[in-house]
Image (cartoon, grey):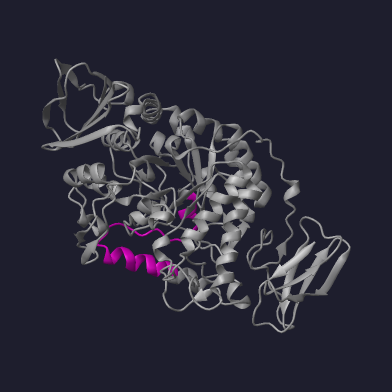
Amino acid sequence: MRFEVWAPFAATVSVTVEATSGQRDVDLQPDPVAGTWVGVLADVRHGDRYRFVLDGGEPLADPASRWQPDGVHGPSAVVDVRRFTFTDGGWRGIELADAVFYELHVGTFTPAGTLPAAVSQLPRLAELGVTAVELMPVNAFPGERNWGYDGVFPSAVQASYGGPEGLATFVDAAHGHGLAVVLDVVYNHVGPEGSVLGRFGPYFTDVIRTPWGDAINLAGAGSDTVRRTFVESACHWITDFHVDGLRLDAVHAFHDPTALPFLEVLAAAVHDAGAAAGRAVLVIAESSDNDPRLVRAPAAGGMGCDAVWNDDVHHALRVALTGDRHGYYIDYDGVGDLAEALTHRWVLRGRRSTVRGRRHGRSADDIDCGRFVVFTGNHDQIGNTPAGDRPPYDTRRRLVAAATIVLSPFTPMLFMGEEYAETAPFPFFVDHGDPELLEAVHQGRRREFSAAECSGEVADPASPATFEAAVLNPTLAEREPHRSTLSAYTELLALRRRHRALTASDASQEVTRHGDSLVVRRERAGAGARAVLVLAFGEGVCTEIDVGADLSIEFDASDRRWGGDGAAATLDRGRLRLDGITAVLLVG
């Protein structure tokens, strides 16, 4: 087996291997072309532990480790990808136009908190109608409880989740159910405990600091190899694990003033890896910059990502449904800004942001709506509350939010459990080994919510009870009102598939406001298909809207089938009458 490591400041490098035949220490030799240290050892097998030794010092795990079976402080282990059993030879991935994402956290998705256990839940996700499972980060982190964004080995699968074989099994099973797998990856920082990267080379930069840990060196001295390390990490998820796409965490935190941006290089490499494997592969960016260049082609001055998360739709929708104007919601006025988002993709597209104290964003009117991922909630929006509470929606508001997202021309994403109105919160949690670090995290969370004028007790991130409270209970869907909510979500996703006027890129769209209601009209002229989505946000308000002739009601959030109060919308000669907060879809 070939061992290779980048250690530009070391005078000597050796590798210590603990194999079944005993321990061996082998000196590595410099490769002047690659700038790395290399060596070849025979009789090394899957699972054998190894560490590198720089200049005779402390043995260190491999910064490019694929497996840390004994935790982030232990040795690395050899991974033989030939052991992975895939049965997905005919799988070709999914196109963005067909994507409905389902974000989940492996540790709380099932009581066991593992990838093999999550396999048992795939049939219900396929039946629900989602097409892609988006896993929150699975790269190795300290302890056994973490959101995943404190990972310190970007290429290793968390051992407590099932390790590399667990991920391979999950991806193969997902493909067998017709579900793609998108993996959330973190290339802007590493966590505060257990990282060895800085011991090997200039992986970090002091030019900026992230709120979460050391920032990655993407533009300074030595950054060519740093970039290559992370590009190889990204591609190995595609080639070795058959993953169908990557969600790139917080790309706005990249410090990269270079002429050839790392993000552009990364997106191109991942797409090339997918093409070589014969699969459609997606690159999705998370960014708070509201910058359309993220999803423009490099030839047009863009980064080449397929899609970008869109927080503006979430924020405007939540304000419209709750009136909440705390924290970053102060930048949004509710119904009016939701109309702006549905029309122009972003609300902040050059408008002044009160939170930032400046103008923010840029117009994206020329970008297809399908390239924006929208949601009623995600891990951040739920976790950015003191106790990780889910959106404070009653049944009617929950279905209005779902209809807004699922029946929009954007690409929808559900957060685990929302489809049956899961009651478990999703607070921030960690399992660091350093008590002082744990206390610092707890105090930091308390300060954060004090500054944000939030009320309520802040969940202790270090408490096992905080983690345990977040574990899902999908058996809730067997009883009311959860069963009706699940039926409504299933129906909404079926309607999205059935009526292409809702999502087709060649459909015209008009959004109009009628008091506290919005009317979204979509039409495919050549196909003669029309869809009208009416969203009403007025509590106790009776609304009448002229929607046009030859339409029929396909979905009504007030229907008793979905747990509504039965105050059903009525349609008479093209005039729609509805009461209170609701959502109605009409097609013709």
Say if 92 sits above or below 329 in the image: above
Residue 159: name its quadrant. bottom right
Q: Is residue 101 left or right of residue 79?
A: left
Say if 259 sits above or below 185 in the image: below
Q: Is residue 173 left or right of residue 380?
A: right
Pick the residue in front: 78 or 223: 223
Question: Which residue is farthest front?
Answer: 299
Q: How many marks?
A: 0
Q: Which residue range is magenta in the image?
A: 441-468
Q: What percent of the width, then of the height, locates residue 227? A: 55, 67
Say if 387 sits above or below 501 in the image: below
Question: Which residue is farthest right?
Answer: 21
Q: What percent of the width, then of the height, locates residue 165? A: 68, 48
Say if 96 sits above or below 431 in the image: above
Q: Is residue 437 left or right of residue 330?
A: right
Pick the residue in front: 401 or 385: 401
For the N terminus, the image quarter is bottom right
Is residue 538 shown to the viewer in this render? no
Q: Is residue 422 left or right of residue 54?
A: left
Is residue 39 shown to the viewer in this render? yes
Q: What percent of the width, then of the height, locates residue 15? A: 77, 72
Magenta-span inclusion, residue 503: no
For the C terminus, the image quarter is top left
Q: Residue at x 36, y 60 (%)?
A: 458
